Image (cartoon, rainbow, N blue to C red):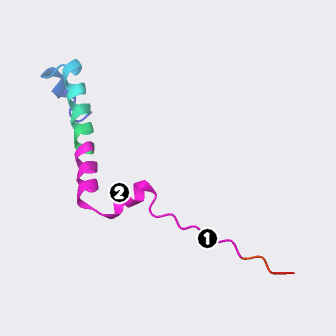
Amino acid sequence: MIYGKIWCVVKPSVGIPILLGAVALGSFAVHLALLTNTTWLPKYLNGGAKVVAAAPAEAPK
C-alpha cells in the first residue's frame, strides 16, 4: 500500500469516514454543476418530450 503510513498519523475510524465523505461531496458537487449549467441533462433525466405517433386512419369499405 502506497500510503499505508498515513494510518500511523490518522486513526482509520476518523480517516475513512472523512475520505468517503469527501468523495460523496465531490460527486454531489459535480452532479449539481452539471444540472445547473447544462440544458440537455435535465431534459435527458426527465425523458425529454414524448412523441406520440398517430395511428393510421382506417380505409373506408
Q: Is residue 54 left or right of residue 60?
A: left
Residue 9: which quarter of the image?
top left
Secondary structure state at the residue bearing disc 2: helix
Q: Amino acid at mark 2?
A: Pro
Span shown in magenta: 28-56
Q: Residue at x 15, y 22 (%)?
A: 10
Label 1, residues with CA under 10 Å away: few <14, some 14-19, many ≥20:
few
Tag 1 near tag 2, CB within 8 Å: no
Precedes in sequence: disc 1 or disc 2: 2
Q: Residue furthest left?
A: 9
Residue receiving disc 2:
42
Query: Is-magenta flag for residue 52?
Result: yes
Residue 18: which quarter of the image?
top left
Label 2, residues with CA under 10 Å away: few <14, some 14-19, many ≥20:
some
Foreground residue among 23 and 28: 28
10 is higher (above) or lower (below) than 25: above
Residue receiving disc 1:
53
29 is higher (above) or lower (below) than 36: above
Q: Residue furthest front?
A: 60
Q: Is residue 61 left or right of residue 25?
A: right
